[in-house]
Amino acid sequence: MVRIGKKVFWKLFGQYKGLRRELYVLFWGKAATNMGAMIWPMLTLILSNKLGMNAKEIASITITLGMIQFPVNLLGGKLADHCNKRNLIIICDLVTVICYLIAAVIPVSMTQILLFFTASVFQTMENPSYDALVADLSGTEDREKAYSLIYLGMNLGIILAPSIGGMLFQHHLGVAYAIDGLTTLSSTILIFLFIKDITPVTEKQKNVYEQEQHTQSTWKILWGQKTILFFLICWAVYQFSYTQFNFLIPLNMEALYDAKGAVYFGFITSLNGLVVILGTPVLTKAAGKLSDIQKLTLGQILVWFSLGMYLFIQGMLPMYYLSMVIFTVGEILTTLGSYPYLTRRIPASHRGRISSVSSLFLGAAAYSSQGMIGGIVEHGTLIQAWEWIAGIGAVGILLYLLLMVVDKRTYPLLYGQKK
């Protein structure tokens, strides 16, 4: 049995062998940062339980502060394509650490929330550099494995954080902020010490769609590749539903279980991390023959089904865990498909900028989702909110099915066809 277990382990995790050393450092850096990711999952509950806000007020606060991130994201994308990505990540991380540590020693207040959002703005600024760096350090054929590895690292760290955060929520919230800051600092030290070479991978037969186009503007490239814009719309519709993980689900938990809702939500979030750890290498291997679009469509279907379950499982605690398992499988497939899809179809010279544009689409979807669903919860019922989420998720499935057809016509070389 031990020998069989080892064989299975190496079959699953051995697929990550042979990647650039810097990718393994980014993996551990993401893991270290997310070991302290205790505040984001609890943000809705902090605003609701600690500061006494209702659903609509929470949505207004997060949308207003989130809007600030949009120009910062574009700036981060431009800097990623023109500056040293490693150094940009380090600088942004240091500002984040300072904000977290200050927030740790002050009382729960809007000042503390503003410090948290300032930290998140700088994390937003560095995200295009992270995304572009993963693509730079991996070849076209290794792209799924590289993003799978980084995603695995993110969730390896977060597996215990929400549960610990849920237990600290009631009386020791400052400790959660401190842990966030210290773990981010440890990640920064790893990147500073062990990432030196960020020279992009050179390939003998480079994907023609990734050829650099330094003279073209970002908007000209996007307007010339309307299929990419259509993909971003599809991804945004997915994000509209996915956002309810950290918005409507915790509100649902609090409505049913009061303060214990934070604990239950922490357990559900930790289950999400556990399934990612176990499921990412399995699905990376099992879905290897699926196209990017097929992964994205299947991911959309599973997320739609899992969130739609909330129409029928209110008050049935064990069913929340089943829903989260299905939700997480959909999340994994979407992660395996999204950035590999995007980076295979855009010029390498614009990875950072187009990554930031994609974040604008996702951010707009997330904040509009919170605003709309927050208003429904305020003036209607939770069930009505879940009905809207189910309907919009169904639209997302139809959009991805249409993208399948359009993409094959636009990028025939990726399907082994001639132009």
Image (spheres, rainbow, N blue to C red):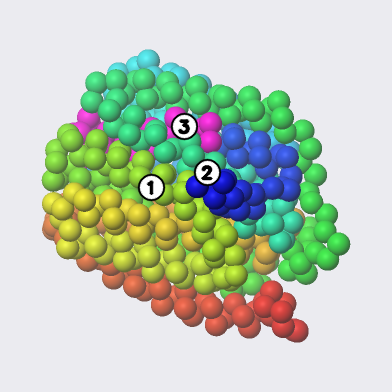
Calculate the distance from the C-alpha at mark 1 to the C-alpha at mark 3.
14 Å
In the picture of the structure, the residue carrying the numbered disc 1 is 272
Check if residue 47 falls in the magenta segment. yes
The residue range painted magenta reads 31-55
Does 80 appear above or below 350? above
Residue projecting furthest to the right: 204
Q: Earlier in the sequence, mark 2 or mark 3?
A: 2
Q: What distance separates the C-alpha of mark 2 from that of mark 3? A: 29 Å
43 part of magenta stretch: yes
Give the class, few, some or many, for how many residues have Cα within 10 Å of label 1's Cα (few <14, many ≥20). Answer: many
| x, y percent for residue 198 | 76, 41
Q: Residue at x 44, y 75 (%)?
A: 399
Question: According to the image, label 3 marks what residue?
Answer: 35
* x 53%, y 31%: residue: 32
Mark 1 residue element = helix
Residue pictured at 59% horizontal, 77% vertical? 407
Residue type at mark 1 is: Asn
Residue 2's label in the rendered image is: 2
**Label 2 residue SS:** helix
Q: Amino acid at mark 2?
A: Val
Q: Is residue 211 above or below residue 29?
A: below
* Callout 3 secondary element: loop
Question: Which quadrant, please, contains the C terminus?
Answer: bottom right
Q: Position of residue 313 (x, y in %)?
A: 17, 58
